[in-house]
Amino acid sequence: QVQLVESGGGLVQPGGSLRLSCVASGSIFSIRTMAWYRQAPGKESELVAGITSGGSTNYRDSVKGRFTISRDNAMNTVYLQMNSLKPEDTAVYYCNADSLTYGSTRYNMYWGQGAQVTVSS
């Protein structure tokens, strides 16, 4: 099994910054893609940014130029640096990891418990 624990959420004023972290632990053999999703009240979950083990990244259009995803493969950790935050960025942010565990022959998706990000004056 794999456990994902997010940290770094909170309340910030418009234009401010936050950095989310997500640490994966457990019987991890390999992690392919790690990603951040978010879900705002009354809305569907959406992919914010993803990063492969080789460092290739992708972002949703609305966060390009403001958010940066990065990862530390040795520490099984993914980060999301969020700058120039807007009220519409308010959501619960979830970490996701596509992981292969010891003794398994297939990759599975694992999710964190979520971190609240609120952008408000």
Image (cartoon, helix red, strand yellow):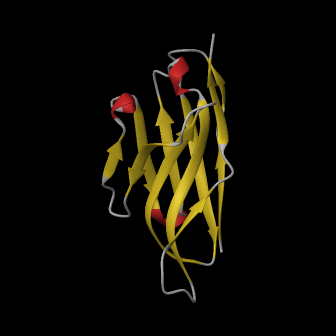
Residue 10, how many percent across, how many down?
A: 68, 30
Q: Which of the 4 quarters of the picture holds residue 69?
A: top left
Name the residue at 42% across, 34% down: 67
Residue 22, how many percent across, how many down?
A: 59, 52
Residue 72, how many percent across, how many down?
A: 47, 58
Q: Which of the 4 quarters of the picture holds residue 19?
A: top right
Pick the residue in front: 58 or 78: 58
In the picture as drawn, the residue positioned furthest to the top comes out as: 121
Q: Which of the 4 quarters of the picture holds residue 119?
A: top right
The quarter in which the N terminus is drawn is bottom right
Label tally: 0
Vertical placement of 1 versus 104: above or below? above
- Left or right? Give the position of 88 relative to 119: left
Name the residue at 59% across, 47% down: 94
Vertical placement of 48 versus 42: above or below? below
Name the residue at 50% across, 19% down: 86
- Left or right? Give the position of 92 relative to 106: right
Residue 61, how many percent across, how many down?
A: 33, 33
- Left or right? Give the position of 21 relative to 116: left
Vertical placement of 94 versus 97: above or below? above
The quarter in which the C terminus is drawn is top right
Vertical placement of 107 versus 111: above or below? below
Name the residue at 62% across, 78% down: 27
